[in-house]
Image (cartoon, helix red, strand yellow):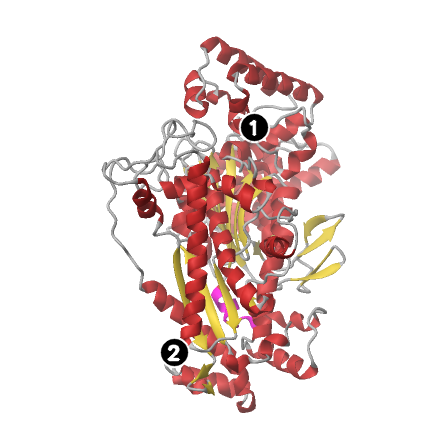
Amino acid sequence: MYENISEGFGMSSLFLFTIGPVQQFISQARKTQDLYAGSFLLSYLTFIGLEEIIEKYGVSNVIYPDLENQPFLEWHNLKVYGSKDGAVFNIDLPTIPNRFVALIPEIEEKNIAELAEGIKRKIKNEWNNMVKKILHEFSLIDNLYSSKGKTNFQELVTNQTKDFPEIYWVAIPLKKDGKEIYIEDFYEFFEKSLIDEEVKKYGEKNVKSLLYHFAYSALERAMGVRKNVREFEQTEEYGYKCKVCGVKEGVIKAGIGGLEVGKYISKKENICIRCFTKRAIDKYLSKEISEIFKDYTFPSTAEIAALSFKKRMLNSEKGKRIYEAYLDKLKEVIKEERVFKTVLVKPLKNLEKYFTDNLFNIEGEWLFEENLTVKNFEEELGVKVNDREVEILKRRLKELTGLQEVGEPNPYYGIILFDGDNMGKWLSGHFLPHMMHAMKYEKIKINKEIRKEFEMSLKNGILSPISHFLISQALKNYSIKFVRKIVEEEHLGKVVYAGGDDILAFVNVEELFDVMRKLRASFSGNVRVENDEIEVDWENTSGFVRYNGEDVFTLGEKATASCGVVIAHYKDPLQKVLGKLRAVEKKAKEHNGKDSFAISLLRRSGEERIAVSKWRINGGDILEKLKELSIVFSGNDEISVSDKVIYVLKEEFKQLKDTDNLVPFDLAREEIKRVIRRSIGEKDDKEKKEKVERVVNSFIEVFESYGGDIDNFLNLISISAFVGKGVK
C-alpha cells in the first residue's frame, strides 16, 4: 500500500472533504440519546461520502482516516460483497471523524468538481431518505403542519432539514498547466523565505519530496478560507421552538400520528423534524445497517450514575432478590407490557454477565426514590398510577438501599472530553521527528529507496504520504483498540464517540480517575496489556503496545493530550453540562503547555470547584495520587481521613497565603502533616504507622506539585474526597 500511493503522484490531487456543524449539532441535546445519535449521524454520513472514493478509486487512496479494520468499512464490504446482515464488531461506535483526506487520480478541475458534487449529492440523498423513513415509521407523514398554517408537509420537511449537513471541500491538483507542480507554485500560500528554509534543510536534490508536505499545508489553509465563506439561507420559523435545538419550530409532539410518550418523546416536548430524526435514528439504522440497532438504548445520565450501585446490588444475593421483587412490582404498576419495555435498557458491557433472560436491567432513573412520583410516571411514561402504588415501590426500593453491602446510588456521574494536543501540527508533519520508532514498524514493507526517503522525512519533519498514513493509523489504533475497551469493558462507562484523538465518554464517578489515566497513557503508548487488561506503564516508551500477538503502533511518548471533565448531578440539564465541559477542556488546553486535565465538580447546590493539573509532575502520576487519596477519604480503608480536613486546611492557610495565593513550602508542609495526622489518629502497629506516613506524603506530594498554589491543591483533594465518599 505504501509504495502504491507514491506511484502516479504527479497525476493526482489532494482532496479534503468535511461535513458539519460538529459542536453545534452534537451539543444540541436534551438526552444522552440525542448526544450519541448526533455523533453517530455525522460519522455515518461522512462514511457515506467516503464510499464514493472507495468505490471509484479504492481504499488505499484514503489517507485520513485510516480505514483498515474500521467498522464502517467492514459493513461496506459485507454490503457490497457479502451478507448485508453480517455481524460487524463495534459498528455502533462512531470512529470516523467528520473529515477525510484522499489522494485522488484526478487533476482536471471539472472532474474534481463532479466528484465533490457526487459525494455531496450522495450524503444529502442519504439524509433525506433517513428523514422520510423515520417520519413514516411513526406515521407522521401528512400529520405535521407549521403553526403558520399554510405550509404543506413536504415544504415543512424541506425547510427544517435542507440546511443540514453543511458540506465543504477543497482540492490541490499536483499538476498545473500540463506540468507537475513545483515548489515555486506554493509561494502564493506561504512566505518565500519559509519555503526556501525548508528546501535548504531538506536538500535541493530531494526537493520533490517536499511537494506533498506543502500541498497538504496549502490544502488545510484553503479549507480555512473556504469555511469562512458560509452559505446561509434565511428561513422563517413560527410557533413554539424545538426543545432540543431551540432554533426550528417544534412541530413534532406526542399524540401525533403513531408517536406516543416514551423513549422518543416526553409529554412536554415539542421537537423539530431534524432533531427528531436524530433522536430516532435507531429506527433507520436497525433496517439499513445492523440488527444491533433494534431497540437500541444509550444510557442516560441517571443510568451512568447508578452503575456502581447496580454492580454492588448484583453482587449481593439478597440484593438481587429484592431487586427482582422491585422489578415485578414496577411491571405491575406500569401495567402495559409495551410501556414497561421502554424502561428497560441494554446493560453496559461491564454488567452484561449479571443479567439473564429473566433478570431485566431497568433504566437507572427508576432506582432513585425522588423519581417515584405520580407526576413522573405520567410525564415520562404516559402512565397513570396512584399514591398507594408509588408508596409500595418506594418501600421496596428502601429495602434494597438499606442493605449495608448495597447502599444508595450516587446521583453524580462523570463526562470526559479528551483531545490530542497540537493535532494540526502532527498532521502537518511538525512532530514527525518524535515518530522515529516508525522505522522499526514491521508492517512498513517498502523498498530501500523509499525507506531512505521516509527516514529523511521523519528526521526533518517533512510530511509524506507514508508518514501521513502512519499518523492516521496510530489514531485509528487508539480509538478502536483502546478507547472502548478501557471505558466499557474494563470500567463502568459508555463511549459517545471516538474519532481518532477526539473522545467523548460518560463514566461512573467511582471509576473516573482510572479511566482518565488509561485514556491518556494509551494515547502515547505508555501502557502494557497483562491478562487482557490495559495497565498504565510510563516506562514503556517504545511507541508500540504488545496486544493480541501484535505490536500496535502509537504516536509515541512525545504525543500529549488534554482532557476536560465535569462531575455533575444526573438531573442537571445536559446542555449546561456540555457547555461547562467545553470550558474546562479549554482550561486544560491553556494550562502550562497543555498535556493537562481540568475537572469541574458541579454540586447540586450550585457550588463549583475547578482543579487543573498536568498529568504527571516531576515523574509523579497525579491521578494515581488522587485515586489513593480517594480511597483514604472513602472510609472503607483501615487508614481513613475525614473530608473535614479540607476545611481545616483552608482556614489554616488563609493566614499564610501571600498576594499570589501561594504559601511557603516549609510552613505548608508542616501544617499538612499536622492536620492529616490528627485526622487519622495515633496508630500503634508499625505497619499502620508506615501507611499513615505514606498517606501524609501523598498529600504533600500533591501540594508540592503545584508550587504552593493552595486553592488548586484544596480543589484537587476536595474532588478526590468527593469521588471517594460519594454523596451521603
Residue matched to label 1: 344
Q: Is residue 147 magenta?
A: no
Viewer-side residue, 85 vs 711:
85
Which residues lie in the magenta part?
A: 424-433
The reply to whether the magenta stretch includes residue 425 is: yes
Helix, strand or loop status at disc 1: loop
Q: Nearer the viewer, residue 661 or 621?
A: 621
Is residue 712 visible in this depiction of the protein? Answer: yes
Graded by Cα atoms within 10 Å as few (under 14), some (14 to 19) or many (20 or more), the crowding at tag 1 reads some
Mark 2 touches mark 1? (CB < 8 Å): no
Image coordinates of residue 597 in percent, x first then y, are 51, 51
On the image, the x and y values in percent for residue 81 come to 64, 57
Q: Amino acid at mark 1?
A: Leu
Task: Please count the marks in the image.
Answer: 2
Which residue is pictured at 71% across the width and 55% down the height? 528
Query: Where, quadrant-wise, is the N terminus in this rendering?
Result: bottom right
Q: Which mark is residue 189?
A: 2
> Who comes first in sequence, dot 2 or dot 1?
2
Q: Is residue 478 above or below residue 300?
A: below
Near-viewer residue (34 or 11):
11
| Residue at the limit of the structure toward the top, as seen here | 388
Say which of 659 and 109 sits in front.
109
| Percent position of residue 193, x then y | 41, 85
